[in-house]
Image (spheres, rainbow, N blue to C red):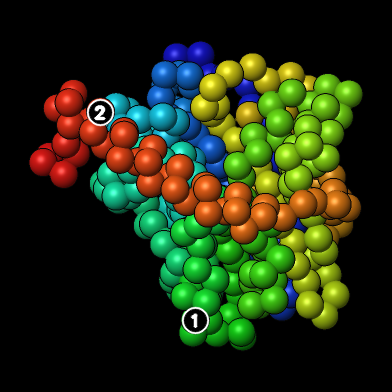
Amino acid sequence: MRVPDFELRRFAGPVVHTEQLDGVRVAHLTDQHVGRVTSHDVQVGAVELTNAQEPDIVVLSGDFVAHSQEFLDQLVDVIGRFEAPVFGVLGNHDHWSGADEVRWALRKGGAEVLDNAWTSIEVKHQRLQIVGLDDAYTGNADLTRATKGLDPRTATIGLSHIAEEADALWDRGVPMVFSGHTHAGQVTLARLHEFILGRVVGHKYVHGLYGTRGGERPGAVYVGAGIGAAVVPVRLGARGRREVAVFELGASIGAFEEHHEEQQPARGRAPSVELRRKRVVEAQQKSAKRRAAARRKGINPFAE
C-alpha cells in the first residue's frame, strides 16, 4: 500500500499543563469522512502515521462518515487500527447519517464516544480530563452537561467538532480544545480558505492554532485540516493538506519548533436563531432519509 502524503504538525500544550503534566503526547485527527470520496488507503495511512508518533492518546473531533451508513464496517476497521486509547465526538455528518449507528461503529472499533460528557483517565500515572461536546452545528451541544463536575485542579482538554464552541469551553476551565469541520478549506492558495470560510461562511477559526496558551486564564483551540472529504477530494496549498497534529502536553512553549504560533481569529459571524433551527430540522430529515436508505439496502449494524 502506498501511504498518502500528510502534514505532521507539532505543538506544545497550554502553559497551565506544564504545572500539571509531564510529557503526555496527544495525536489529533479530524474529519475522516470514511466513504467513497476518501480511499481506505488514505484512512489507513493516517492511522499508520499517527501510530508512528507513539501518542499516549488519540483524539478525534468528528465527521467520521460522509453521506451514508454503507461504510460503517470500514470505520470500525480504521478505528481499530489505532494503537493508543481513542476518544471522539460526533460531527454534523455523523448526525446526518445516523448518530446511533456511527456511535456503534466507533465503540465497536474501540473508541470512547463523549456525548456532552467528560471522562478522567490515567496517563503515565497522571490524571487527565477529556471533555467531549456533541455537535453544535446540528444543535446537539450541551455545554452545561458536558462540563458538569469537572475538577479545576486537574489537567483538561476538550473536543468539539465546531471550533467556535471553544470560547465557552475556555470559560468552563478547558484550556485546550481540538476541533475540525472546516477541512482548512481544502484549497488554501492565495489565502482563499480564509476569505471563504472566514468572511463568507463566518467562521472565527479556520485552520490551525488560535487563542492563547499562556496567561492566567489560557484558552486555545486547534482546528485540524482533516483526513477525508465529503464531496471533492482536491486539496491545494500547504495549509489544506491532510494532517495529523501532535500536541506535547506539559512541554514548554519554545521547547521545540512549532508549525506556527497562535493566530488571530477572523471576525466571525454567529448563526442566527432561525438558521440554527433550520439546521436542526435538516439534520433530523437527513438522518431519517439515510436510515431509510440503509434499511432498503439491508444495512443493520445493530444486528451484528
- Where is residue 252 drawn, in percent x and y? 79, 64
Is 148 placed left or right of 262 in the picture? left
- Where is residue 71 drawn, in percent x and y? 32, 28
Q: Secondary structure at mark 2?
A: helix
Q: Where does the N terminus fall, quadrant-wise?
A: top left
Residue 66 in view in this figure = yes
* In-front residue for pair 47/160: 160
Residue hosting label 2: 293
- Where is residue 174 drawn, in percent x and y? 64, 71
Q: Name the quadrant containing residue 97.
A: top left
Choose the circle earlier in sequence order: 2 or 1: 1
Residue hosting label 1: 148
- For the residues labelled 2 and 1, the Cα–Cα distance comes to 38 Å
Please say if 143 is above or below 59.
below
Q: Residue furthest top?
A: 2
Please say if 231 is above or below 213.
above
* In-front residue for pair 176/125: 176
Q: Where does the C terminus fall, quadrant-wise?
A: top left
Amino acid of disc 2: Ala
Residue drawn at the location 64% of the way across and 77% of the way down: 172
Is 302 placed left or right of 249 in the picture? left
- Where is residue 138 drawn, in percent x and y? 50, 51
Residue drawn at the location 58% of the way across and 80% of the way down: 154
Is 262 placed left or right of 76 in the picture? right
Tell me whether the residue at label 2 lies in contact with that at label 1, contact meaning CB atoms closer than 8 angstroms: no
Residue drawn at the location 11% of the way across and 41% of the way down: 303
Amino acid of disc 1: Lys
How many numbered marks are there? Answer: 2
Q: Name the quadrant containing residue 228.
A: top right
Q: Residues within 10 Å of mark 1 (few under 14, many from 20)?
A: few
Please say if 284 is above or below 170.
above
Residue drawn at the location 31% of the way across and 34% of the way down: 289
